[in-house]
Image (cartoon, grey):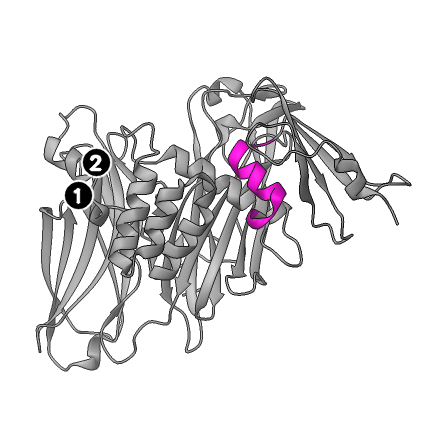
Amino acid sequence: MKEYKKIIIFLFVTATVFAQQRQDFKIQYDVSKFRGDAEHVYLEVYYAFDVSLLKYVKLGSDYQSEVIAGVTFKRSADDSIVARQAWRIPFSVTDTTMLLNSRSYMDVFGFYLKPDIYRAYIVVKDVNNSEIKDSISVLLDVKLLQTETIALSDVELALSINQIERDSTNRFYKNTFEVKPNPSRMFGLQQPALFYYLEAYNLRKNESEYYYTNAVIANAIGKEVINHEKKKRRINDSNVEVGMMKVNTLRTGVYTFNYIITDSVDNRQFKTSKKFFIYNPSLPNDTVLNRASNDVDASEYATMSEQEIDKEFEQSRYIATKGEIERYKKYSTVEAKRKALFEFWSNRDEDRSTPQNEQKQEYFKRVSFTNNQYKTGFREGWKTDRGRVYIVYGAPDDIERHANELDKKPYEVWSYNSIQGGVQFIFGDRTGFSDYILLHSTHRSELHDENWQRQLQAN
């Protein structure tokens, strides 16, 4: 695989100082891992966002906007940065009516990474309006692919796949194909065909003329609803596996795409999978499927490691009840922990008609923000007092920063106008290492100390 080094830019745009308010600005993303070299995995991050929600400014005869998009990988063990890419992406339209409907921009970042557990941060910011932004934090366990047996890359789900001439300027080109990703993994009404791309390696480990493939779509309870089977010749040690499946007859719900290679020598099977969503309001809901959507085996937790599960529950503890925390401590198996975390967030999903859990997305968006803004030399941002308050209560309506008063150490006053008729949180940097701790709050359930100022007296 070839690492992409350029991004090609253009698309659409809007009216003078104009920003659509149809919905919140959100990033959609997906990740796929492929074979790199002997020491590295090649990883692609796909992302998309709605450019009609950006702010546009009249420049000459056009209306223009610009975003900064970036992906950063940090090693989970020590939070050190190992890779980063960022781009400024301009957009332009001649007529603002072009942006009355949503218009999606998608792109890809490519990285070569050594095996490790990483936290990936995906950020998109509007240059013209700092309030139009979104960020996502993703935990990834990156492992080298097997070399002794047949091995499969991750699946890239795509909007289209076309065979084209080699084109080094096309960021979606790889192995003779133009593969346009679908970071939302949403198909159905607007996207009736699911395209898939993956790579198979070490096919010649066994000497026989053929191997067999199955491209399978299964619903939330694991029942196969589509199955395409093929018999293929072993021509090369590696092969690109691409195809298309019509999904316009599937009902709304969560599905899994499975790709299985069966070795004709010993009948061993090798599988790679990816979950996706169908939105097809023209068909009646499947009541069996809707009940199954409450099954942990049909959720993202089914494939998470115990370390990932523990980390996510630890980060969720600020809104966990005492009973939930105590019960989780007693679980000794990863299956029990998966079920507990699945139920934890399912119970907090206020709109189960959508495939996403908006409450969970917002929570971990805040976790990602605090890790970027409030990290100290000793703790991750979400573990700090400011991080906790931000995660639990959201962004404050106002922040007063007192950094240079002669007789006091630095402190901050955060005000929330819509909580309990208006509350304040006061944080002080008593150590001088930018580790602001909570000294006092007027919130009824928080630390209260009317004499908080004595803790900030300069020596």
Q: Quadrant of the N terminus?
A: bottom left
Vertical position of residue 227 compared to residue 416: above or below = below
Relative placement, left or right, of 180 versus 149 is right
Asked if the residue under mark 2 is in contact with the one under mark 1, i.e. CB atoms within 8 Å, the reply is yes
Q: Is residue 138 magenta?
A: no
Q: Is residue 54 visible?
A: yes
Question: Label 1 amino acid?
Answer: Ala
Q: Secondary structure at mark 2?
A: strand
Residues drawn in magenta = 382-395
Sooner in the amino-acid sequence: mark 1 or mark 2: 1
17 left or right, relative to 287:
right
Residue at 11%, 79% in the rendered image: 208
Query: Residue sitting at 44 percent across and 76 percent down?
Result: 39
Residue 27 horizontal/vertical position (percent): 46, 39
Q: CA distance from mark 1 to mark 2?
A: 8 Å
Q: Main secondary structure of the magenta part?
A: helix
On screen, residue 83 versus residue 210, left or right, reads right
Seen in the picture, residue 344 relative to 177 is either above or below; the reply is above
Q: Secondary structure at mark 1?
A: loop
Q: Nearer the viewer, residue 320 or 394?
A: 320
Q: Quadrant of residue 272?
A: bottom left
Query: Whole-percent x and y of residue 192?
Result: 22, 35
Mark 2 lies on residue: 253
In terms of image quadrants, where is residue 215?
bottom left
Q: Position of residue 334 (x, y in %)?
A: 28, 59
Nearest the eye: 266 or 295? 295
Residue beneath disc 1: 220
Asked whether 126 or 170 is in front, the reply is 126
Kind of residue at disc 2 = Gly
Q: Tag 1: Cα neighbours inside 10 Å, few (<14), some, or many (≥20)? A: many
Q: Residue at (22%, 40%) from the top-left corner?
A: 254
On the picture, is 406 further left or further right than 122? right
